[in-house]
Image (tube, grey):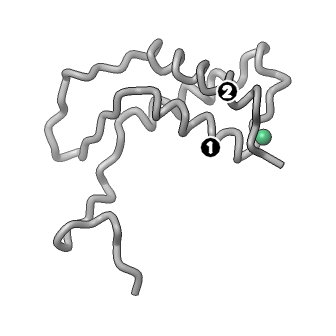
Amino acid sequence: MKADVYSIKGYSLKEMRNENERGVCRQIEKMIEKDEYKDMCFCGVCLEDIYGLTLNKLPPKYKHSRTLMLKKYKVSESDIQEAIQYAMDIVGKSPNHV
Ligand SMILES: [Zn+2]
C-alpha cells in the first residue's frame, strides 16, 4: 500500500484545507462568465493554472474544521478577484494547453 504522504505519525492531514480554495472556485466561476473573458480558453488545464496561480498569489489560510482560525490574514472578496485577474492575464497570454 502506498504511504499517505499527507500524514504525520499516522495522523491524516488531508482534511487541512486552504480556506481560500472554496472562495477562489466560486469567484472563478463568476468571473469566467463575464463578457470580457468570452474569448479566453477555460479548459481543464487553463482552469487549473488560473486556480493555482490565484491561490499562490493570496496569503494561505490553512485550517481544519476543528482548529482555530487565525484572523490575522483576512482575505477579502476583492483580494481574491484581483488575484484571479492576475492569474487570468498570465494564463490568457501564455496558456499551457496543447
Ligand atoms: Zn485551455
> Where does the N terminus fall, quadrant-wise?
bottom left
Name the spot of residue 78 as percent of width and height, x first. 47, 12
Splitting the image into 4 quarters, where does residue 10 fall?
bottom left
Residue located at (80% from left, 34% from top): 41
Residue located at (38% from left, 16% from top): 76
Residue assigned mark 2: 90
Q: Nearer the viewer, mark 2 or mark 1?
A: 2
The local secondary structure at tag 2 comes to: helix
Amino acid type at circle 2 is Ile
| Label located before the other in sequence (2 or 1) | 1
Instruction: Answer with left or right where residue 79 lies relative to residue 66.
Output: right
Rounded to the nearest whole Å, what is the CA distance between mark 2 and mark 1? 13 Å
From this view, report whether residue 98 is shown above or below residue 73.
Answer: below
Splitting the image into 4 quarters, where does residue 72 fall?
top left
In the image, 59 versus 22, the foreground residue is 59
The local secondary structure at tag 1 comes to: helix
Name the spot of residue 15 as percent of width and height, x first. 31, 54
Mark sitting on residue 80: none
Residue assigned mark 1: 48
Name the spot of residue 74 as percent of width and height, x first. 29, 19
Q: Tell me: is circle 1 under 8 Å from ligand 1.
A: no
In the image, 66 versus 41, the foreground residue is 41
